Amino acid sequence: MADILNSFSLSGVAASLAEAVSVEPPREANPSLPQLTGLVKRSTASGKVDRIFMYNPDAIAMWIYQKYTSFFDDAWKHAQLALPLRTVMPSVTPVCFGTMYTGAYPEVHGIQKYEKPIIRIDTLFDAFIRAGKRAAIVGDPRCSMSNIFLERDMDYFRFDTIEAINEKAMELIDEDRYDLLVVYNGNYDATMHKTGPESVASLEALRDNVRAFDAFAEAVKAKWTHHDTLLAFAMDHGCHEIDDGCGSHGLDMPEDLNILHLYGVVPKRA
């Protein structure tokens, strides 16, 4: 049997998120994914949400889910939808996150290799800002998410460690003021490159990502009770093992292209 790639494209996420909060999608975005928009419509009284919390780990492949399914128990419990997606080529971080948040393919959003220029086409962040909504990104200073969406009327929080990033994210959840809050954690990717996707250190980083998402989701449920919220555990691309026990990604192969996003809706309680 030939290698099988997921049929739904990562490029459908941006329009789906925009539709979830009833704002116009980014101008170059591909069509939304009915599986995701349908989840929102049937999960809230209004058929929409007014908050989105995006947790973006890096490089967690669908085959990792398949092989280590129980590792994700504390993420699954917050989700009503597991959405298999095919990321874009080349399957490297700035290219893939560029597509996730513009809805456009790399040749349209402009990043077609591992580089971190500011994306100049319309993004989900711009769509939120036009609608009078507040957006923020929390990540480390060197990561793609902290750089390719700069120069917009939104907030950027940069910290050198995962611990500081996640501590700030918890503070922002507690402050309850952002309509779109995006948190990036690159620890699995960093460890995977050095020691391979399935090393003890990499699998512990994976567990850290799941624990972080679980903590964020519980905080959202406790603090954002006046809001209908969409939660996402949404990575950029997958990974594969290479020589000398290291890990990599960027190739046109199922291990790098197939990913599985988790989405859950938390209805307001007050």
Image: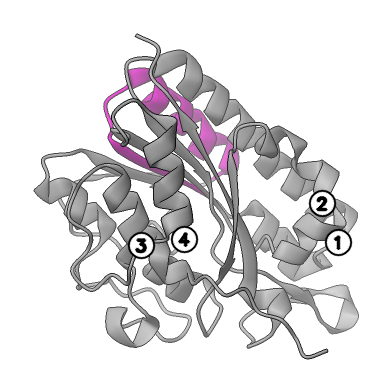
* First in residue order: circle 1 vs circle 4: 4
Rendered location of residue 174, percent (x, y): 40, 19
Q: Which residues are magenta?
A: 161-184
Disc assigned to residue 203: 2
* Mark 4 element type: loop
Amino acid type for the residue under numbered disc 1: Glu
- The answer to whether mark 1 and mark 2 are in CB contact below 8 A is yes
Q: Read off the residue under disc 4.
A: 143
* First in residue order: circle 1 vs circle 2: 1
Amino acid type for the residue under numbered disc 2: Leu
Is 126 contained in the magenta span?
no
Amino acid type for the residue under numbered disc 4: Cys
Give the label, 1 or 4, closer to the camera: 1
CA gap, disc 4 and disc 2: 21 Å
The residue located at (40%, 25%) in the rendering is 173
Give the label, 4 or 2, closer to the camera: 2
Q: Read off the residue under disc 1.
A: 198
Drawn side of residue 186 relative to residue 121, left or right: right
Drawn side of residue 201 relative to residue 230, left or right: right
* Mark 1 element type: loop
Q: Read off the residue under disc 3.
A: 32
